[in-house]
Amino acid sequence: MIKQIWRQRWVFFLVTVALAVAVNGLVSVRPAVAESESAPLPEVESEPEPILVNKAQPLPADYVPLDLRPVDIQFAFAGDSPKRLLSAEAAAALEELFQAAQADGVELVGVSGYRSYERQAEIFAANVRCYGSEEAANRVSARPGESEHQTGLAMDVSSPSVQNQLVEQLAETAAGRWLAANAADFGFIIRYPEGKERITGYQYEPWHLRFVGRTHALQIVGQNLTLEEYLAG
């Protein structure tokens, strides 16, 4: 009788130990699963900060981007010209933007891309003659060294709906509305937005696209900022 009791206790003991091992084993697994599920995702390399070129931060006269290439898009003019050039990354992004616009039934044309310091000096001098003073000209045209076109990251675009002209009426067309709604998805911003003239120093230009990279562009547009405001923040 005593042996039977001890045998029962021994069996109970073994069962208890087995259950404890099983339970501890399960408990030890859960933190590992939790750690795996909550492990942070690997960081994605961030885009470089956009360069700022404006009236307060000009480029040197001899600055020329090293990776300029022709952009494979429809232009408003025929023949070879430096105006067909952009830096490589901006050129590839603009080609994708034009392809997407075409797929949506929107017709765009390129008007003016890269512009040298010397060419900007000629354009500004012509605007001074047209507007009567440097001050007046500088509201619509950059002095040499202060133009984003010299960076190889800016392209003026238009549409046949406004006879391929660089005019504010572009914003009221299907092409202008498409640009405003979609340019950031391809890394571009409308660099001189309406209502921000005091900050940018230039009149509203719905045609002037500046490449800053998709991450930056989406943040700038999403927060309704100029590039100046974005970089200052």
Image (cartoon, rainbow, N blue to C red):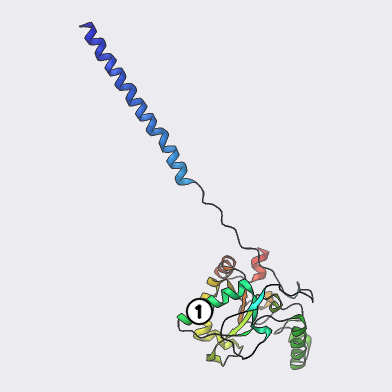
**Residue at figure coordinates x 25%, y 12% from the top left:** 7
Closest to the observer, 113 or 182: 113
x, y (%) of residue 40? 51, 48
Closest to the observer, 9 or 75: 75
Q: Mark 1 — residue?
A: 99
x, y (%) of residue 24? 39, 29
x, y (%) of residue 209? 61, 78
**On-image quarter of the C terminus:** bottom right
Task: Please say if 48 is above or below 24.
Answer: below
Q: Amino acid at mark 1?
A: Gln
Residue found at the far left of this picture? 1
Residue found at the far top of this picture? 2
- When asked about the image quadrant of residue 11, the answer is top left
x, y (%) of residue 104? 45, 81
Q: Secondary structure at mark 1?
A: helix
Q: Crowdedness of circle 1 by 10 Å Cα count: few (<14), some, many (20+)?
A: some
- When asked about the image quadrant of residue 194, the answer is bottom right
